[in-house]
Image: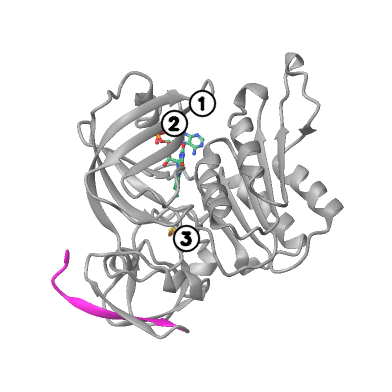
Amino acid sequence: MPGERIHTVRFEPVGIEMDVAEGETILDAAFRQGVAVMHGCKEGQCSSCKSLLIDGDVEMLKYSTFALPDYERETDHILLCRALAYSDVTIELLNYDEELLSRSIAVREVGATLTGLSSLTHDIRLMEIELDSPMKFWAGQYVDLTIVSAGITRSYSMASTPGNTTTFQFIIKKYPDGAFSALLDGGLKIGAALAVRGPFGTCFRREEPTGPMILVGGGSGMSPLWSILNDEARSGRQRPVRFFYGARSRRDLFYLDEIEAVGRQLRDFRFVAALSHAEAGDAWDGESGLIHEVCARALAAEGLDGDMDAYACGAPPMIDAVIPVLQRAGVEPGRIYFDKFTPAVG
Ligand SMILES: Cc1cc2nc3c(=O)[nH]c(=O)nc-3n(C[C@H](O)[C@H](O)[C@H](O)COP(=O)(O)OP(=O)(O)OC[C@H]3O[C@@H](n4cnc5c(N)ncnc54)[C@H](O)[C@@H]3O)c2cc1C
Ligand code: FES
């Protein structure tokens, strides 16, 4: 353990206790001991791990005030991914569900080799890796991938399904200046060594809800949604599934035939693609606008009900915009799961 002094963390209202070493964040201690608490970016950017300090002393590492505004810090809110404990502490979890706690997988690190790279669009790549030993995960989770030769680590969500624990696929958007993603066009050769740490993330397919499932994403947010969609189809549960996917123009859309093929395995499936900046030559006769607007219109028109759950993945502003839309459509706030693809810190 990184620190020398060990303290006890007690999570309320679930009554779970675990150790934390001084110098180790409370979230890292939870990963190490296989305690599943709510989290997203792990870097103080997304607010998913926000909790209430009931008792004890913590110090916070640097974080974004978007994730934890000053008025919340002043009222004893903390980010578990940034909090170091200096005494025994009691923390109230603000967001948790029984299924999350019961499906915890302890985080570990394994070596891997790059086995495939191909283009899905002009700026989206499909990457495949072979792990040295199996890693269990749930559909929708992510890992931290390190390019060993370059020493660069970034988070990427598995696009493949949990049935395959040694071959992982990732859908990755390329940024021209991206330390990791720009290497996907020529900078990274098949056979390159990678390190995989995980699994992380709480936006994984839940098995409890019995009503309709709603998926919303844009760009490389397809990666976890593709895993969740395929995993749901494979489960044979036959809940209604609605999939809303936003892109700028026609050239940013991909997997249309593949989505249709998965849809044929489901009794009640609708896929809605929306273009926010359709180009003259696109000859687009589908939905236009931002995906949260299109999602709002479609859900209002259809009036879905029942024990629904929703999964949103991609750019943080898209997720912030779609959460109230999903709530208005009748999805309980605790059943809206999301992963904000926040840029890496530092
Ligand atoms: C939980 C989680 C899951 C993720 N899953 C995926 C995934 O499945 N697929 C995927 O493609 N990405 C995913 N990401 C994002 C990914 O981790 C990297 O942040 C992204 O690939 C950029 O890394 P980079 O090294 O290429 O760019 P960096 O070197 O980190 O950034 C270089 C430049 O690229 C641009 N840039 C980088 N990130 C963003 C951004 N998010 N929005 C706008 N501009 C940006 C900026 O101009 C920035 O200055 C995920 C992030 C998180 C937190
Ligand atoms: S702010 Fe802690 S996990 Fe994102």
With 278 as the anchor, is 28 left or right in this view?
left
Decide which of 312, 47 is in the foreground and name it.
312
The residue pinned by badge 3 equals 202
Q: Which mark is residue 126?
A: 2
With 15 as the anchor, is 191 left or right in this view?
left
> Which amino acid type is marked by label 3?
Thr
Mark 2 neighbour density, 10 Å: few (under 14) some (14–19) many (20 or more) = some
Could you tell me if residue 304 is visible in this image? Answer: yes
| Residue extent of the magenta highlight | 1-12
> Disc 3 vs disc 1: Cβ atoms closer than 8 Å?
no
> Disc 2 vs disc 1: Cβ atoms closer than 8 Å?
yes
Decide which of 29, 274 is in the foreground and name it.
274
Of badges 3 and 1, nearer the viewer stands: 1
Image quadrant holding the C terminus, namely: top left
Of badges 3 and 2, nearer the viewer stands: 2
Measure the alpha-carbon separation of dots 3 and 2. Answer: 23 Å
Measure the alpha-carbon separation of dots 2 and 1. Answer: 6 Å
Residue 102 x/y as whole percent: 43, 73
Which quadrant of the view contains residue 82? bottom left
Q: Which mark is residue 256?
A: none
Query: 194 above or below 91?
Result: above
Could you tell me if residue 346 is visible in this image? Answer: no
Numbered disc 2: secondary structure: strand
Ligand 2 visible in quadrant: bottom left
> Which amino acid type is marked by label 2?
Leu
Which quadrant of the view contains residue 271? top right
The residue pinned by badge 1 equals 120
Residue at image position (28%, 25%) is 190
